[in-house]
Every structure is written in C-alpha cells, then in structure tokens.
Image: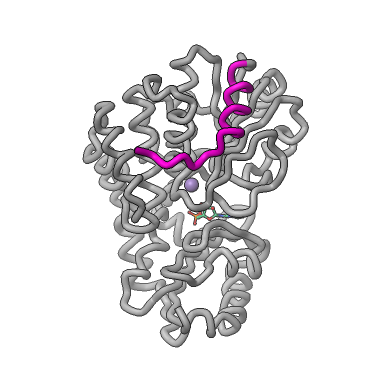
Amino acid sequence: MLNKIISERNIQKAKKLIDQSDKIIIVSHLSPDGDAIGSSLALYHFLLQIGKSVNIVVPNNFPGFLKWAKGAKDIVVGEWKENLVRELVNVADLIFCLDFNILKRIDQLGPLVEQSPAKKIMIDHHPDPDGFCDVVISHPEISSTSELIFRFICRMGMFDYIDKSCAECIFLGMMTDTGAFTYNSNSPQIYYIISELIEKGIDKDAIYDKVYNDYSECRIRLQGYILYEKMKLFKEYRTSLITLSREEQKKFQWRKGDTEGFVNIPLSIENIIFSVFIREEESMIKISFRSKGKFPANRFAAEIFNGGGHLNASGGEFYGTLEEAVALFEEALPRYADTLLMN
Ligand code: 5GP
Ligand code: MN
C-alpha cells in the first residue's frame, strides 16, 4: 500500500480545478530532463484519458533519448513556437507546473505563466517552492516528480486511468531522477510503484535501454576526452571539476543531451564526494553539481552560482567567461573545506 503523502486538502482542491477545466496546459523546466518530460507526459496521458484537452509546453528542446516516449513529438518547444505558446497560455483555464519550484526555471515562459489568469497547480520535489500557484503539491522527500504524478492520480481514485503510455512515462522519470535507482532510491514504495507499473504492461528493461544505450558515437568519444584530458581532481577537497568550452563541443559535434550524466562519473572515484561540471553555452556558462552524502550541492550552487536544486544534484549559471567561472569556483572551494571533509 502507498503512504498518503499528498494531503487530502490538496487532492480535493486539485480535483475540483481539473473537473472545472477544459483547456489545460502542462509546463516544465528549461533543458527538460527525464523527470520533466516523464512527469509531463504521464499527466498528459492521464488527462487525455479523462477527456481533457491538454498541451505540454517546455521552454527549449530536450535530448533525443527522451523522444521515443509516446506524445513526445506533440510537446510544444517554446523557443520555436512563441505565438502558439502565447495562444495556449492565454486560453488555458488550468496550468500544471511540473518539476520546478520557481518561475525563473521556465525562463521566457515565466512572465506568461505568472500573468495568466488560469488557475495553477504545482507538483514538484524541489525544496522551497515559490508561491505562484493556487495549489502547491511540493514533496522534496520524494525522489521524482513522476512518482508524485503516480501518487497524485492514485489519490484522486483514478488508478484505472493510468494506461500503458502513462505508466511508461512515470517509470521514465522515476528511473532518470534516481540514476536508474542508484541514489535517492531506498524507499520501498518506489519498488511497490514499479511493480504496479509493470502490471500496467511496461517493459522496464526496454525503457532503460532506450534511455541509456542509445548514445551517438560522438558522445562516447567526448566522454573519453573529458575523462582523460579535462577532469581535474582537488583531492584535498574530495572534489572533481570538468570544464568544456564551446570549441570543444563543436569538435565533438555536441548535441543536446550529449553531456548529460557526465557530472556523475567522477563520483565513482574513491573519496570524491563533490563533482562539478562547467560548460560554456552560447549566452552563459552552465554549471552542474553532484554530491554524495550530506554535502549540500544546492547550497554551493545557490551561494556561488545563483542556482539551486536538490541536496545531491543542483545547478547554476554564470555570466562571464569560462575562465572566470572556473576562477570563481576555485576561489570558493576552500571555504567549503570543513563540510567536504566532515561528510
Ligand atoms: P542538471 O545538472 O541536471 O542540469 O540539474 C540538476 C538539478 O539542479 C535540476 O534538477 C534542478 O533541480 C537544479 N538546477 C539546475 N540548474 C539550475 C539553475 O540554474 N537554477 C536552479 N535554481 N536550479 C537548477
Ligand atoms: Mn525531477
């Protein structure tokens, strides 16, 4: 049996809003990952099953290894379809905000969503949600938003409306936000839910294969390059740093998603508990952080790079050169020595 994590009050409020709405949109975060796409598509399939008109909108494109999911090709990519997005947001009577806690995370869609008269429901697992939604279903103790979507549908008494496509998308997000069940994945309830999803007909091994064994040759060669040439260890701080310039990305014909997961690799080195990946993008420097144990990657992201996220997986941004970002990181690192050495 599942614990009743989502409050009865939130379920009743959300259910009423869904009943009252005909035109629903689902919005998720910038550079959508497996949980953003998985949770959005899972809710999308469910809402279609109960006869609603629904669209998914994300700020920018997402990696090819998520495009096999049913419905993925119908996702509206904001940066390509500005007018359509404006229209959809304007006529919507309900907006679901999935897998993000602050409007900044949806980039250019933020002001549109904020100004929309539509009712808003947040379903998310990042700490400290902002108050821009009418219903806030925020559970940082749950490892994926996709798991929350399963719980949300079940708590509304609508388990029977989870079809195979919906179940596949729930599994996709649960798997990717736990590194294929290698971290944040000790809750027995996760495996109870997976057993229910398998009963719905999903092939979990095939989903793993589609996500993790479908890389381009360039990605694998880039992985070899960064580990051999670019990884720098700060052993005294139990930390690893990888940097990647635009020029290097061009050399390896970088495509969206090609560097996904690289930041996790140095954590497999003994005694390394903090891994940082600094990547030059067209208009900014994007930083990814991963940590093991109690070291708060999200605090480092927030304090040094104006970012945030989860305790063990977070991100931030920097406006300047790659070298300046690296200098800022190297200058800040010693200030975290106590926490790094303690954990
Ligand atoms: P990733 O390294 O996979 O891009 O991001 C890991 C996690 O960090 C995301 O799931 C998200 O919670 C958080 N995150 C990434 N970038 C940012 C950012 O710029 N700002 C904030 N607040 N969180 C971020
Ligand atoms: Mn997530």
Q: Position of residue 206 (x, y in %)?
A: 23, 37
| Residue 79 shows in the view | no
Q: Where does the C terminus fall, quadrant-wise?
A: bottom left
Q: In which quarter of the view is residue 42 placed?
A: top left
Residue 203 belongs to magenta span: no
Q: Nearer the viewer, residue 245 or 340?
A: 340
Q: Is 144 located above or below residue 237 in the figure? A: above
Q: Nearer the viewer, residue 70 or 166?
A: 166
Q: Position of residue 222 (x, y in %)?
A: 35, 59
- Predominant secondary structure in magenta? helix
| Residue 264 shows in the view | yes
Q: In which quarter of the view is residue 229 placed?
A: bottom left
Q: Where does the N terminus fall, quadrant-wise?
A: top left
Q: Is 159 located above or below residue 242 in the figure? A: above
Which residues make up the magenta segment? 1-19
Instruction: From the viewer's perspective, tell me whether residue 214 is left or right of residue 245.
Output: left
Q: Position of residue 168 (x, y in %)?
A: 33, 32
* Residue positioned 41% across, 84% down in the render: 235
Q: Is 332 located above or below residue 38 in the figure? A: below
* Residue positioned 56% across, 31% down in the render: 11
Count of numbered labels shown in the rendering? 0
